[in-house]
């Protein structure tokens, strides 16, 4: 099954994507993580992408489509794949449709997590993440056992530089103008689109996604 997780920054795509991929045979393509790894390794892509990321803007379509194409080629035998953070524009979505067609696949379900901007801004202010295993915490609602340190691997947690309030405001604007049309794109091509209230608690959202994808509860 191929699934897209769509939703504004801070709505919980990362957390829910991790839940889905704790199942055997489920993997994720997370463009934000791939880009942050490229930035950390000072690659040419990373240097180019960082200029956009620090301003809360989208990395140009041609760069991101090429990045996803490379990863998809390596993942084409994966039975279940979750796209998290991609596609974020209509052009990325139509390119993804073409890539999947070439592989003889198609998108099964688009899960849209929804929440109001005010709630998202509050959530993002408490967000901390592990630079190594990518686990996500929230200092208010889901803190790590030991303050500031990842439960999985003891790495020091970071507050992403693009999670500061001004950059978040611009990322939310970009989501509404560039990424919301992706939902309409999938509706127009007849994909199954499931909207899930991202304001509910993490477990409730997890259950609703599990139901939307008709998966067994684990
Ligand atoms: P995220 O972790 O998904 O919030 O992504 C962090 C940043 O990476 C975004 O604000 C964008 O600058 C960039 N980014 C991630 N995915 C994409 C994408 N599909 N298209 C363009 N830029 C992206």
Image (tube, rainbow, N blue to C red):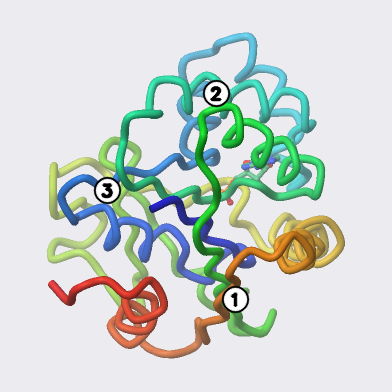
- Which residue shows up at 26% across the image and 56% down it? 148
Compare marks 2 and 1 and give the one earlier in the sequence.
2
- Which image quadrant is residue 121 in? bottom right
**Which image quarter has ligand 1?**
top right
Tell me the residue at 36%/69% (across/down).
Answer: 138
Name the residue tied to disc 2.
39
Q: Quadrant of residue 53?
A: top right
Residue 98, position in %: x, y? Answer: 68, 34
Which of these two is toward me, 22 or 77?
77
- Give the spatial CA distance, label 2 vs label 1: 25 Å
**Is residue 22 or residue 38 the one in the foreground?**
22
- What separation in Å lies between label 3 and label 1 (alpha carbons)? 27 Å
* Mark 1 lies on residue: 120
SS class of the residue under badge 3? strand
Taking depth in this image into account, of 131 and 158 the one nearest to the observer is 131
Mark 3 = which residue?
26
Give how far across and how far down residue 85 sits, in percent: 57, 49
Earlier sequence position, callout 3 versus callout 1: 3
Q: Quadrant of the C terminus?
A: bottom left
* SS for dot 1: helix
Closer to the eye: label 3 or 1 = 3
Tell which residue pokes out farthest to the front in this image.
Answer: 104
Q: Residue at x 46, y 15 (%)?
A: 41
Name the spot of residue 99 as percent of width and height, x first. Answer: 62, 31
Report whether 180 appears left or right of 77. right
Q: Which residue sits at x=74%, y=34%?
A: 59
């Amino acid at each position: 099954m191929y699934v897209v997780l769509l939703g504004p920054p801070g709505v919980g795509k990362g957390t829910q994507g991790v839940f889905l991929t704790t199942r055997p045979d489920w993997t994720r393509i997370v463009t934000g993580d791939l880009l942050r790894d490229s930035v950390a390794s000072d690659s040419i892509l990373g240097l180019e992408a960082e200029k956009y990321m620090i301003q809360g803007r989208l990395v140009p379509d041609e760069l991101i489509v090429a990045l996803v194409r490379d990863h998809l080629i390596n993942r084409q035998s994966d039975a279940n794949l979750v796209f998290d953070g991609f596609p974020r524009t209509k052009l990325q979505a139509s390119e993804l449709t073409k890539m999947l067609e070439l592989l003889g696949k198609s998108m099964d379900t688009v899960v849209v997590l929804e929440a109001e901007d005010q709630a998202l801004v509050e959530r993002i202010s408490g967000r901390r993440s592990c630079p190594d295993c990518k686990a996500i915490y929230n200092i208010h609602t889901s803190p790590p056992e030991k303050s500031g340190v990842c439960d999985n691997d003891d790495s020091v947690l970071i507050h992403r530089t693009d999670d500061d309030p001004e950059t978040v405001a611009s990322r939310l604007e970009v989501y509404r103008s560039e990424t919301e049309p992706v939902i309409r794109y999938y509706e127009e091509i007849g994909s199954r689109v499931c909207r899930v209230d991202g304001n509910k608690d993490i477990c409730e959202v997890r259950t609703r996604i599990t139901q939307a994808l008709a998966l067994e509860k684990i």
